[in-house]
Image (spheres, rainbow, N blue to C red):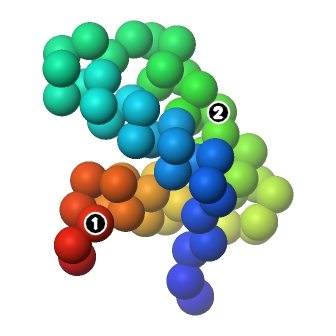
Amino acid sequence: MAIELTDELIALETAAWAEQQDNRLTVATAAAVQAAVTAHAQATGQSRYDVEAALKRRVRHPEG
């Protein structure tokens, strides 16, 4: 089953990844991503781990 990702999740992870690349990732940004991933996983009945992994692949490796 494919993991459906929302635009909000993608935007949050994109912001976190940009901060991480610039060595300025904040706890607030990381916590916002984790909270959104957890909420999405619970709402869709999917594993939080699977949602997070799919999100990171989508944002960090869009060519794959």
Callout 1: SS? loop
Name above or below for residue 6 compared with residue 9: below
Image coords of residue 4 (percent x, y): 62, 72
Instruction: Find numbered disc 2 in the image and state the secondary structure of the residue it sits on.
Output: helix
Q: Please tell me which residue is depicted at 40% across the width and 41% down the height of the picture.
A: 14
Name the residue that disc number 1 marks: 62
Q: Residue at x 55, y 83 (%)?
A: 2
Q: x and y percent of residue 23 in the render?
A: 18, 16
Are dots 1 and 2 in contact, CB under 8 Å? no
Horizontal relation, residue 9 to residue 43: left or right: left
Query: Along the horizontal axis of the image, is 54 left or right of 7?
Result: left
Identity, as a three-letter code, of the amino acid under mark 2: Ala
The first of marks 1 and 2 along the sequence is: 2
Give the residue type that dot 1 points to.
Answer: Pro
Q: Quadrant of the C terminus?
A: bottom left
Q: CA distance from mark 1 to mark 2?
A: 23 Å
Q: Residues within 10 Å of mark 2 (few under 14, many from 20)?
A: few
- Residue 35: numbered disc: 2
Indicate which disc residue 18 carries. Answer: none
Q: Quadrant of residue 22?
A: top left
- Residue beneath the point at 26% across and 53% down: 60
